[in-house]
Amino acid sequence: MKNILIVEDEPDIQELLCAYLRNAGYQTAVAGDGVSAWSLFQKQAFDLILLDVMLPKIDGFGVCELIRRQSQVPIMMLTALDGEEQQLRGFGLNVDDYVTKPFSMPVLLEKIRVILRRSTGAGEENRLYYRDLCMDLDNRDVTLDGRQLELTAREFELLHTFLAAPGRVFTREVLLAKLWGYEFYGDERVVDSHIKNLRRKLGRDYIETVRGVGYRAAKEAD
């Protein structure tokens, strides 16, 4: 699951971005100021950073400069300032894209997908094959015998988790932490419910139950 750092000091925008990106299948972390953003970046690995310009303590340009000294992780800057000077300054720091507030969430999501696809490189290496299943990780498509399956973002990530490590057993606790995040305190049976739905859509029992432990994709094909 791609991990995105959201650096935004407005709580309403934080909440909106987190909800929308998690619903799209991304993992998120949030920082409300430049110092917190830099601290989080040093502790975790991120696939993309959504970086507001107007931040307390250290502004977005300052955070970008710090990050660029160590990493070329994709950075998308969010700003209420639409002046050419601001944008040129951002691009001078090797920012990957510049989005002016207010912005369209569907458009923002598509920009994120394009940047992530460009940063990881598209091609056969971004596909997973398992028996009669094919997962296209760039386009987030799953086909079974050539027929496309309609999976939710959470079902896609569940299937990806299993197929990326056939034979490995995942406990409910691990799946909750990986797909729902450590902040989730709900009933672990939510995992069972999603796996039940995923099995129904697959129409074949590719996901095995390991009694008393968790779930796995069988290592050996039929």
Image (cartoon, rainbow, N blue to C red):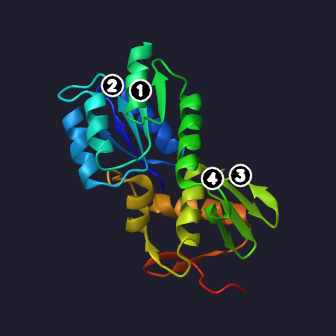
Q: Classify mark 3: helix, strand or loop.
A: loop
Contact between marks 3 and 4 (CB within 8 A): the answer is: no
**Residue labelled with disc 1:** 78
Does residue 120 lie above or below 129 as drawn?
A: above
Three-letter residue code for mark 4: Asp
Find disc 3 in the rendering and name its residue: 150
Q: Residue at x 26, y 25 (%)?
A: 55
Q: Which of marks 2 and 1 is nearer the N terminus?
A: 2
Residue ID at (30%, 54%): 44
The earlier-in-sequence mark between 1 and 4 is 1
Q: Are marks 2 and 1 in contact (CB under 8 Å)?
A: yes
Q: Which residue type does callout 1 highlight?
A: Leu
Q: Which of 156 and 107 is in front in this view?
A: 107
Sooner in the amino-acid sequence: mark 2 or mark 4: 2
Q: Name the residue under label 2.
A: 53
Residue corresponding to mark 4: 138
Could you say where residue 54 lies in the image, as x and y percent from the top left? 29, 22
How much space separates mark 2 and mark 4, taking CA atoms? Answer: 29 Å
Circle 1 or circle 3, nearest the eye: 1
CA separation in Å, label 1 and label 4: 24 Å
Q: Distance between the residues labelled 2 and 1?
A: 6 Å
Whether residues under marks 2 and 4 lie with C-beta atoms below 8 angstroms apart, the answer is no
Task: Tell me which numbered mark, 3 or 4, is placed earlier along the sequence.
Answer: 4
Say what secondary structure mark 4 lies in.
Answer: loop
At numbered mark 1, what does the secondary structure look like: helix, strand or loop?
strand
Under mark 2, the amino acid is Val
Q: Is residue 31 left or right of residue 142?
A: left
The CA span between labels 3 and 2 is 38 Å
